[in-house]
Image (cartoon, rainbow, N blue to C red):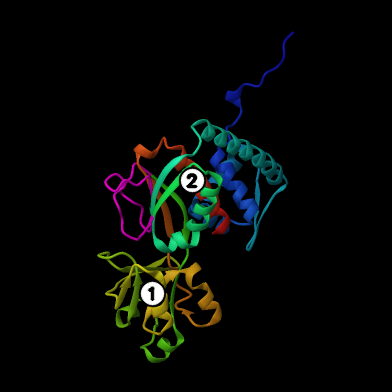
Amino acid sequence: MSSKVDNPELIPALDLNALARFAAVVELGGFSPAARALGVPRQSLHRSIAQLEQVTGVRLLDRGARQVRPTDAGRRLFGHAATILREARDAHASLRAARGRPRGRLRLTAPHLFAEQFLIPLIEEFLATWPEVQIDADFTVAHSDLIRDDYDLAIRLGDRPTHGRYVVMLGSVATVCCVAPAYLAAAPPLADPQALSRHSVLAYGPHRVRHTWRFERAGETVEVDLAPRLRADSARLVLAACRAGLGVARLPEFLCAGDVSAGSLVPVWVDWQIPRTPIWVLYSSRSDKNPTLHAFLDRLKAHLLARM
């Protein structure tokens, strides 16, 4: 007795990453929110969906002016994708568990503000879940050497780190250029970003870093080199100085959103976009086999996806 078996070489392969991106676009209702959630450029999402449509031979999305909706075929694929991704996550979790139970010390470093906003509740949850884990955390904007300073992982914001055996992008945060109304009333006009050179600038960042602020608008890019009146590695100090009318500041949106809503700070140049700040995690080959590190990274990725 014989049975017909499909030849796997004749079945087009569906890329799991492309399926995950397709699922994010459908779940979040558009390419822009999916790109922000996944921390990837919109163009990458468009290419992934186009490749999926080419492989499947059907249109998967109706792309409207304001919203993206799945076609009938897209809805069917989304159902399968959700099942496949769930199975993939379960398999991944099973492999992680097979590598060993999280235990022992995990030493990490991250910028203070990021830690306050995202890491502190995660660390509390992680310690409660894994009683055999100890965490040694340093919160600073200074860039430490992983090996020399004995860190298992470091979180950095900004340009892609050049050190670290493994570097992974976790997402990105929005940045706002803002000022107090009292400063606007007394200062020279802020006609465009290049006017910043005639203003008092309040900068958040590490010591001995060049302060160049970049702005984009409809394909045009402007970069302004600045000599800040105030430079601090405390974003809250920069926020307080900006609130007091001492100058123009560029701050993470999640930090100053309340002040902007209350009117105590005003965004400037809303027609100019500030590139989002990438979030990177880096660790060395020494830490790659550490089950505690990988369990922490899995929780961190899920935590950021839910909160950003």
Q: Earlier in the sequence, mark 2 or mark 1?
A: 1
Frontmost residue, 90 versus 113: 113
- Horizontal side of 141 relative to 275 (left or right) equals left
Report how many numbered discs are placed on residues in the image: 2
At x 31% / y 59%, what residue is drawn?
142
Residue 61 position, x and y percent, is 65, 50
Residue 230, above or below 67: below
Q: Secondary structure at mark 1?
A: helix
Answer whether residue 157 is magenta in the image.
yes
Identify the amino acid type marked 1. Answer: Val
Answer whether residue 43 is magenta in the image.
no
Residue 190, above or below 215: below
Q: Quadrant of residue 210?
A: bottom left
| Magenta segment boundaries in residue numbering | 138-166
- Residue at the outermost front position: 131
At x 44% / y 46%, what residue is drawn?
134
- Residue at the outermost top position: 1
At x 37% / y 88%, what residue is drawn?
187
- Quarter that holds the C terminus: bottom right
**Residue at numbered disc 1:** 238
- Horizontal side of 208 relative to 117 (left or right) equals left
Crowd band around label 1 with a 10 angstrom C-alpha radius: few (<14), some (14–19), many (20+): many
**Residue at numbered disc 2:** 296
Q: For the stretch drawn in magenta, what is the main secondary structure?
A: loop
Distance CA(mark 2)–CA(mark 1): 31 Å
Can residue 291 be spotted in the picture? Answer: yes
Identify the amino acid type marked 2. Answer: Phe
Residue 152 position, x and y percent, is 37, 45
Residue 160 position, x and y percent, is 36, 53
